[in-house]
Image (tube, rainbow, N blue to C red):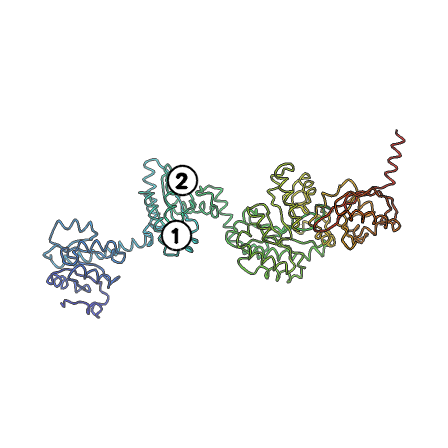
Amino acid sequence: MPENQNADVHSKENRGKPLVLIVDDEEINRMLLANILEARYKIETASDGQEALQKMRHYHGMISAVLLDLFMPNKNGFEVLKEMRTDDMLRHIPVIVLTGHKDAEVESFEQGAYDFITKPFEVPELILARVAKTIRLAEETYIVSTMEKDPLTNLPNMSFFKKLCRLEKQRLAKSGEKSAIVYIDLVNMKSYNSSYGYAEGDNLLINVASTLQSTFTDMPVGRISDDHFAVMVAQSRLESMLEILRTRIRSTGKGTAVEFHAGVFKEEDGQDTDIVAAVDYARIACATLRGNYNATVCYYDQKLMKKYNDRQHVLTHFDQALSEHWIKVFYQPIVRTATKEICHFEALARWIDPQRGKLSPGVFIPVIEDYNLGVRMDLYMVEEVCREYEKRKSNGIEPVPVSVNFTRTDFDQMDMVKAITEIVDKYNVPHNMIDIEVTESAFSHNPGWLQKQIDALHANGFQVWMDDFGDGYASLNVLQENTFDVIKLDMGFMRKFSPTGKNGIILTDIVAMSHRLGIHTLSEGVENEEQYEFLKKIGCERIQGFYFGKPMTIDEFLESVREGKALPIEKPADTAHFDKTYGFNLMSQLSQEMPGGIIVYTSDEKEEILFANQELITMFGCDTLSEFLEYSNNSFKTLVHPEDLARVQKTIASKIGHGESSGIDYLDYRIITKTEKVKKVEHAGHLVHDSRYGNIFCVFLSDAEKRANALAQQEVVC
């Protein structure tokens, strides 16, 4: 047998044979062993420990066993065993120790040796049997280790963890203990990998695994997948162990505190829950904490199971819900505060499931948001609103704008302006009939970029509303940095409504500030007359809430119109008129008990009626503001008797010349009603100088004839 085996390892006669490395500083020993083994094995030899390690690395993955002498120069056998144990490439290679010293056998086993062969060498058949047994045992051990251990963390995988848990449950049961499964999910692992790289991410997982093992000593710990781990612990120790883990795990990362979410399944008396099912229940509990940074632990219960099943139903049926129109548009009316007419609708998504009936928005909206499905549903809502636009028109319903909700992620995922425009144009819907609502929170992320989207929407003729104003912490800054047409006051203001408390002061100032910024205001969540009257008084222009109507389908709304139950709908001309009047609190200037109107006088002596209350409208023989504005041609001059007009204008001009706000002297003159009736009226009021509009007169009229009759009756009584 030649001493140098390198040429023979890959020879034709050695193909398919396991490779054995013989390490001994005595050439005769190497030759004797080679002669015994060469019939069954490929042979490679080394004369000292250093050469042996070099050849093990050279033939990495090929060596089936090493026959290792203990006493050699250039690294003895013990040193070789020690280095092999710390080297991931070599530690799985089985070693048979060659020794004539009985005392060395125990130490070699402690260092990881599988077996030993004594010197002088025994009968060849016994050596062959020992080598074959060692190779078979090592292969079985490696296969089991590979199948049952996670290669990165060396923790048991799910299969092995399940076996360990069964044994632990039996042990706990003998001592009268009940078990709990804890499912652990590291928070923001994707962000950690992005910040520090995947190599550091792997190091974090290794550190977490080590921390789990050192914390839950002698308890089953497994890596389930990715950054998900599971532990079985006695329920009596659960709380204290989680508290210890919370402290220890924070320091396992690099330069940042590591947090985790934990779902817990606690087995009840008499239960014998399958381990896989218990882990799944704990996982379900853990999943409910996604996005919640205030809670660490969630315990599984039946309510949680229902919630999980609902989420799964939404996920698995979302495509079908869109294609088969299970998701319906419900329209909630938005009412003009001044007239109590419907001036807008908000489109709200409602899931009508053929199996489960109406799903609460609280069930399906969070799932859609969590899985970034919102962009598909929001564009679907635009298409449904546009598709039903013709249905409203064909049934004689005045076309009022409909607002549709969008989120920041919608704009992140695609060119939303282009997508919205294409859908609206597909159905030939005027762009001013679709308003875009974006939540305030959307503007906390890259606000400059989102303002560009607002500019693009404005350029395409859409109005943009900020939804949920006041719900976050950056509301005022958002108003400063972005351009909105409308802000919707969050319904939280109405839940805490107090007209004389802090709430009332804040609302009053927000509305006044919005007027000065040229932004229309809308309050949602209005549910009673007191709230309505307060909002009307402070000048909030539009109102939405159950007080004026609940969300309904287009068919339900059309039915309410046919039955005469629906509120009147604002005419397009009135909408255009009111769109010009922001910046001035109409309601605070007029009484609803006395006929009055608000008139703007410009520097070139032109004037325009901004608003008239119902009492003034009725005085002129009209029923609605639209009718009144049409009759007057939006000018107070046409309402005054021609013979009295010059005198009235002279009085108004004298007040404007003072350059300050002042009352209007008592004035009587004649008006002409729509029925061509001439009435004598008495005129009072005051002048307001407004930075946006200029000179605004608040005019109050009283019927002189009625007043005279009332005075005459008083004299008779006296």
Q: Residue furthest top?
A: 718
- 594 with respect to 283 (left or right): right
- 602 with respect to 717 (left or right): left
Residue 417 occupies which quadrant of the picture? bottom right
Q: Say which of 588 and 562 sits in front.
A: 588
In the picture of the structure, the residue carrying the numbered disc 1 is 225
Amino acid type at image mark 2: Glu
Q: Say which of 207 and 485 sits in front.
A: 485
Q: Say which of 716 and 296 sits in front.
A: 716
Determine crowd level at label 2: few under 14, some 14-19, many 20+ residues with C-alpha closer than 10 A: some
In the picture of the structure, the residue carrying the numbered disc 2 is 267
Q: Which type of secondary structure does the marked residue at label 1 adopt?
A: strand
Residue 9 to residue 502: above or below? below
- Residue 326 appears in the rendering: no
Give the distance between the C-alpha atoms of the residues marked 2 and 1, in whole angstroms. 23 Å
Q: Residue 112: where, in percent of width, then height? A: 21, 52
Amino acid type at image mark 1: Ser
Residue 526 occupies which quadrant of the picture? top right
Q: Residue 446: where, in percent of width, then height? A: 53, 55
Q: Which type of secondary structure does the marked residue at label 2 adopt?
A: loop
- 694 with respect to 122 (left or right): right
- 143 with respect to 685 (left or right): left
Q: Say which of 281 and 444 sits in front.
A: 444
Residue 649 to residue 501: above or below? below
Q: Residue 715: where, in percent of width, then height? A: 89, 31
- Residue 235 appears in the rendering: yes
Determine crowd level at label 1: few under 14, some 14-19, many 20+ residues with C-alpha closer than 10 A: few
Q: Residue 620: where, in percent of width, then height? A: 83, 47
